[in-house]
Image (cartoon, rainbow, N blue to C red):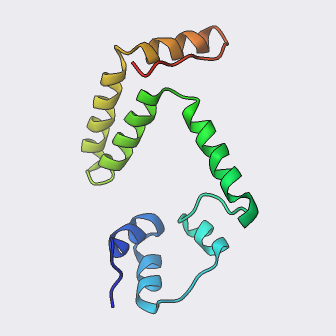
Amino acid sequence: MPPTFGGTQRLPRLAGRKRALELLLTGDEFSASQALELGLVNKIVPHDDLIASARALAARIIRHSPLAVAAIITAVTRGLNMTIGEGLLKESDQFARMVPSHDLAEGLAAWKGRREAHYTGR
């Protein structure tokens, strides 16, 4: 049976059309290292380190402005389904929403002052 839950749509976007078709049509299993090579996963960690590794990644993300994180997620996820021109407009729109924010001013001031930023999410 064909894959469900978007498997025929997500895999080609991540691994490329030819590789996705090979995997989908053969049903061959693949290793974690092959998944890394295909771009399906970002990193391979031992099972016992999984939660710590995920928390470390989350900590690296949440040190940034929640507004900026949301803008990036929006631009990337929506832009993937658009032409490059439309995607650039979506990115520009997200940036424009950040311009009047406290978080952008604080982030720039912290960078210029070589200090840690203190974001408020406004």
Q: Residue 55: x percent and y percent?
A: 64, 46
Image quarter where the N terminus lies is bottom left
- Where's residue 17, x and y in %? 40, 73
Residue drawn at x 47%, y 89% as measured from the top left = 27
Q: How many marks?
A: 0
Most foreground residue, 86 or 117: 117
Q: Position of residue 46 (x, y in %)?
A: 75, 65
What residue sits 62% from the left and 45% below the top? 57
Say which of 13 and 47 sits in front.
47
Residue 91 vertical position relative to residue 54 in the rendered view, above or below: above
In-image side of 108 versus 115 (left or right): left
Where 20 sits versus 99, above or below?
below
Residue in the foreground of this view, choosing between 24 and 120: 120
The picture places residue 34, in percent across and down from the top left corner, at 62, 74
Q: Residue at x 40, y 36 (%)?
A: 70
Residue 117: which quarter of the image?
A: top right
Vertical arrangement, residue 77 with respect to residue 32, above or below? above
Q: Quadrant of residue 85?
A: top left
Q: Residue, x 28% and y 54% (percent of image)?
A: 81
Q: Is residue 35 left or right of residue 120?
A: right
Name the foreground residue: 26 vs 84.
26
* Quadrant housing residue 56: top right
Of the 4 image quadrants, the one containing the C terminus is: top left
